[in-house]
Structure formats: C-alpha cells, structure tokens
Amino acid sequence: MKIKNVSFDTKSRPNVCVAIVATTEAMFNQRWQETRRADIDVIEWRADYYTGDGATPLSWLKAESRPVIYTIRTKEEGGEWPYQKDQYMARYKQAIDSGAVDVIDLEWARDGEAKTILKSYAKEHGVKVITSYHDFNATPDFKAGMKLLQALSEDGGDIVKLAVMPESKQDVLTLLSLTLEVKKVISQPVITMSMGQEGVISRLLGEWSGSVLTFGSVSQASAPGQVTVTDLTHTLKDLHRYF
C-alpha cells in the first residue's frame, strides 16, 4: 500500500510518525512547523486535544507533502475526546471534506453505525482507514491477541493498529510474537506497539516484526514510551543495515 509517496509495507524500515498535540491554533502551528523540520515520513493530528473547530489547521495541512493521519482519540482509549456520536462523525466528515487528510483512525470499539458510515464516506473520498484498538492497562495473551487482531482486520479498514500496555517483558514479547504471526492470516498492513518504558523495544523492531509505522516525539509525546525522533530515526537506520 502506498499513500502519497510513502509505502506501508514490511519490506523496509517502519515509517516514522509524529503526532501533533495542540489545544490552540498558535500551538498547532508551532508543533506543525517542528514536524516540518523533522526527519519523519508521516504526521498525525491528534484532533481530540484541539479546542477550536479545526478548520484553520485543516486548511494549513493541505500544504503537507507527507501523509496526514487524522485522529480523534476518545477518553475510552486514552484520549481527550468524550465520545458523542454526532460530534464524532461531524468532525471526521469535516476532516475528510477538507481534502487535507489521507488517513483517518477509527476506534474498533466505538459505535458500529458511526464506523460504518465513516468508513464508507472515507472510501468515497479516497481516504484510507486505520482500524485501531488501544489498551492502556494490559496486554492480551497470545490467543486473545490473535482473536482481537483478526477482529480488527475483519472490521474492513485498510490498516490495523494495536497498542497495548505491558506489565512485564514477557508481555512485550507476546506483542512482538502477535505482530509476526498475524501477517500469516490477515492481508492489511499492521501497526503495533507495546507502550511505556518497558515496551520501547517494540517501537524499534518494526522491520523485524512487521509493524509498518512507529511513533516518535519532537517536543511532546502523544503516548507513553515514545522515543525522540532523532534517536528513533538513527536507531532504525542502524538496525536496517542488519535486517
């Protein structure tokens, strides 16, 4: 799969993404300018943090040459947005209509009707869909994790994303094993990560495990355990020499 000029496959090092986390227009512009100077492949706008209507940032993002992921992360999955179906759908439709975003992230566990409508709307407008699930409390065992990833795949998105919190190094190994094995049974590109300090290694081994995207930080992390972009890109390039 290719979005703009960026490939989402497992034949090279994972793409590096930075999330823009901002509450105001001025803060958004500052964070966006920081990402424009960074050596990254993809940007994500975490719109759940934003307090305005979003029209101005979307107009700016039309100038972005890299793929743009638009995300409203709900409080149920560690974000800032109190889920309300109508507002959730309206914001996503606004982003799609703007022509500024290439991918939207839809949470698998949210309202089924809203997801169905938004997936169809995105497809009509040439926008890809990430079907995601985030657990900030635990990591499923291997059997439950495979079942979950297959359910995410069957939901009909273009990319599958799973982010979980480890309680031990064994949990991190379970997540890496899931990433390796799930590619045998689903066709979509997969993004996985084990969060927190314990899970940092999972953000670096995507080329080995098969995760096509990893998240780093420029100034403010959007999730626990994110590595700075400078350290992340250097490490990925060094590892790439041996994979």
Image (cartoon, rainbow, N blue to C red):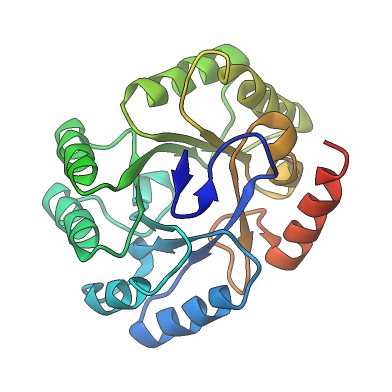
Could you tell whether 115 is left or right of 8 in the image?
left
Could you tell whether 59 is left or right of 148 in the image?
left
Residue 175, image x, y percentages = 65, 28
Q: Residue at x 66, y 48 (%)?
A: 196
Residue 16, image x, y percentages = 62, 55
Q: How many marks?
A: 0
Q: Which quadrant of the view contains residue 141?
A: top right
Residue 119, image x, y percentages = 23, 38
Query: Vertical placement of 28 versus 187: above or below?
Result: below
Q: Which quadrant of the view contains residue 93?
A: bottom left
Could you tell whether 141 is left or right of 95 in the image?
right
Extreme-front residue of the structure:
5
Q: Residue at x 53, y 51 (%)?
A: 6
Extreme-left residue of the structure:
86
Viewer-side residue, 64 vs 176: 64
Quadrant of image for the C terminus:
top right
Query: Vertical placement of 243 versus 142: above or below?
Result: below
Query: Vertical placement of 146 versus 51: above or below?
Result: above
Viewer-side residue, 12 vs 167: 12
Residue 20, image x, y percentages = 47, 68
Viewer-side residue, 5 vs 158: 5
Q: Residue at x 62, y 26 (%)?
A: 179
